Amino acid sequence: MEVPVMENILSSNDKKAAENKKIFAKNKIFALNLIGSPGAGKTSLLEKTIDVLSDQVKMAVIEGDLFTNKDADRIAKYNVPVIQINTSGGCHLDAMMVAKVLPQLDLSELDLVIIENVGNLVCPAEFNIGEDTKAVVLSITEGDDKPLKYPLIFKEAAVAVLNKVDILKFTNFDMVSARHDINCLNPGVTILETSCQTGRGINEWCSWIKERINSKKNGCNNNG
């Protein structure tokens, strides 16, 4: 009996997501939905991204969190436009939440909007918010079993970032197994190994983003 209710929620969300997508397309903005568990290092990766790209592209950040402004406060120190969305306990951002804050950004002046979703590997994968692409961040401290345990986000994401590789030797994370499982779930997905402590992989990550910004500016498909 609850299935029709879920269908209605997703249908309504998808309509608003399509509107958001049109807004991003109209302004030729590459919109990236950044997803990962709490503690995966999404905000640290964002900070490194801003370090590298802020003098090359015009960017803004939308931060999703349950209750606090802690992540938005961190990003604000980098002098890029940032908007906090608190979900009051909700486990993900939805398209309506994003639509409500977009008017607060000067979209005509932006190349890139990164939306850091609520820390969760499940719900954010189910809700399209109008992004061009989803990116999933998995820290090696979470374990190499997560791709198979939470397959949807690894199927949906165009890029999988395996983060915190600087401490790989202190864990039992099997990089070969993780890469194999991600590739089986999503053949052709880009897999990057990063460390926000050493800087490993950050330039590759930023190059991946910049390629998609340029594609969006040139009117190409950014879904991969």
Image (cartoon, grey):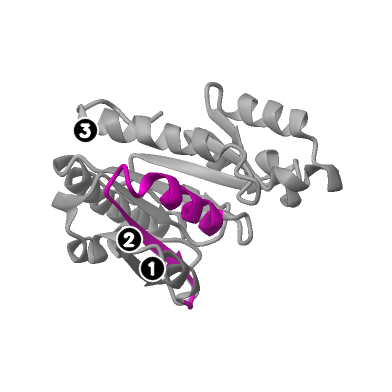
Q: Which mark is residue 76?
A: 1
Element at label 3 = helix
Q: Please name the residue shown 52% across and 21% down the image.
A: 188
Q: Are marks 2 and 1 in contact (CB under 8 Å)?
A: yes
Element at label 2 = loop
Mark 1 and mark 3: Cα distance apart in space: 26 Å
Q: Residue 58: x, y in percent?
A: 27, 49
* In the foreground, 193 or 180: 193
* In the foreground, 65 or 199: 199
For the residue marked with disc 1, what is the amino acid?
Ala
Part of the protein shown in magenta: 42-68
| Residue hosting label 3 | 217
Can the viewer see residue 1? Answer: no
| Residue hosting label 2 | 80
Q: Are marks 1 and 3 in contact (CB under 8 Å)?
A: no
Q: Earlier in the sequence, mark 2 or mark 3?
A: 2
Q: Is residue 160 magenta?
A: no
Q: Nearer the viewer, mark 1 or mark 3?
A: 1
Q: Residue 171: x, y in percent?
A: 84, 47
For the residue marked with disc 3, what is the amino acid?
Lys
Element at label 1 = helix
Q: Please name the residue shown 68% across and 29% down the image.
A: 179
Residue lying at the far front in this picture: please name it. Answer: 55
Mark 2 and mark 1: Cα distance apart in space: 6 Å
Q: Quadrant of the C terminus?
A: top left
Q: Earlier in the sequence, mark 1 or mark 3?
A: 1
Left or right side of 135 for 145: right
For the residue marked with disc 2, what is the amino acid?
Val
